Every structure is written in C-alpha cells, then in structure tokens.
Image (cartoon, rainbow, N blue to C red):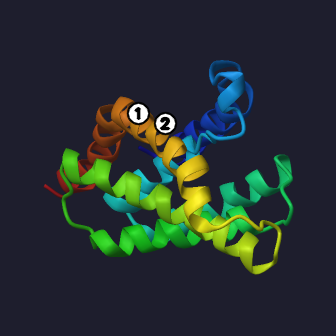
Amino acid sequence: MQRKWLVLLLIVLFLIEGTVMPWIIPDAWQTRIVPHFVFTVILFYAVYRHRYVGLGLGLIFGLLHDIVYYGHMIGVYSFSMGISAYLIGRLTGGKRIMFGWMMFIVLLGNCLFDTAVFAVYTLFRVTHQPYDWALLHHIIPSLFLQLLFALIVYVPVRRALDGDRKKPEEEEQ
C-alpha cells in the first residue's frame, strides 16, 4: 500500500470515527466506547512495515485527534499514539505475525494507548478515577470494538501491506 493511499485510508477512517460511529454506538454506550480505527490501522502498519512510520503516523493523526476532538490537553493523543505504535512495532521486530498474534497485538496496543492517555490525564490531575474503574468502564468496552474492526480489516490491510513488500523484490529479479 503506497503511503498516499494509506494516508487517504487513515483520513477516511478518521472521518468515520467522528461522523458515522456516534450514530451506530447506542446512546447508553456513547461515553464508554471510543473507536480508535485510525490507531488500529497504524498498528498494522507499524507491525507489518516499519515502526518509525508507525511512530510518525501516530504523532500526526494523534495531533489531529487532539485538535479536532479537543480534549483537556493538546498532545496527549499524539504522544500516546506515537509511543504505542513505536513500542508495538519494536516488540514485534519486523517478524511475520500471524492472525491470532496480530489480534492479540491489536488488543495490547489499544490497551497500551488507552492506558497512556489515562496515565497522562492522571498525572496532570484531569481525571480522579482509579485505573481499575477506567479499565472496566472505558478501556475494555472499547477494546471489543477495536478487535471487531481489526477482524474486519485484517485481510485487506494485510494483503495491501504484503503486496507492497513483494513489489521491490520482483523488480530486482
């Protein structure tokens, strides 16, 4: 997948997160479930391609989240997305990751991301809830949505990222 198509996909997912998903998520769950579709695709890219690009995309789209969905502070999502994508990419080390492990990595990465956001908000005393409350009321319900999205997009994203990897090898022969 060329980077321009990746960025276009991430922009479309960013728009879906803010426009379509509030209509789909029931009203009772609006404050509990937060879609992170952009971050999930960034995790795929960090695992299957390169962690530094995952870091850059995390910083850019995290800052876009900070600006558009103005939270309590600017830079929290940017920092959390960037560092989480980098650490997950570093954890996998460029190895070939199969379906089951990739779903576990998506859960781990999204949990790391939400935990980093919670930690920064706790550090600056924006939130006063304990971590176990945030885990049960926000992080775990959101993880189910991220996992469902990762299951849906796994095959197309994996094919696009693998197809892009095979092209330079074919050109050398």
Question: 17 or 129, which is in the foreground?
Answer: 129
* Left or right of residue 90, residue 113 in this image: right
Residue 150 picture location, percent across and down: 39, 39
State how many labels appear.
2
At label 1, counting other C-alpha atoms closer than 10 Å, the crowd grade (few under 14, some 14-19, many 20 or more) is: few
Residue annotated with mark 2: 145
Question: 84 or 61, which is in the foreground?
Answer: 84
Name the element at disc 2: helix
**Farthest bottom residue in view:** 123
Residue 14 picture location, percent across and down: 66, 39
Question: What label does residue 148 carry, if any?
Answer: 1
| Residue name at image x 70 percent, y 74 percent | 120
| Quadrant position of the N terminus in the picture | top left
Name the element at disc 1: helix
| Quadrant position of the C terminus in the picture | bottom left
Residue 44 picture location, percent across and down: 39, 51
Residue 162 picture location, percent across and down: 27, 46
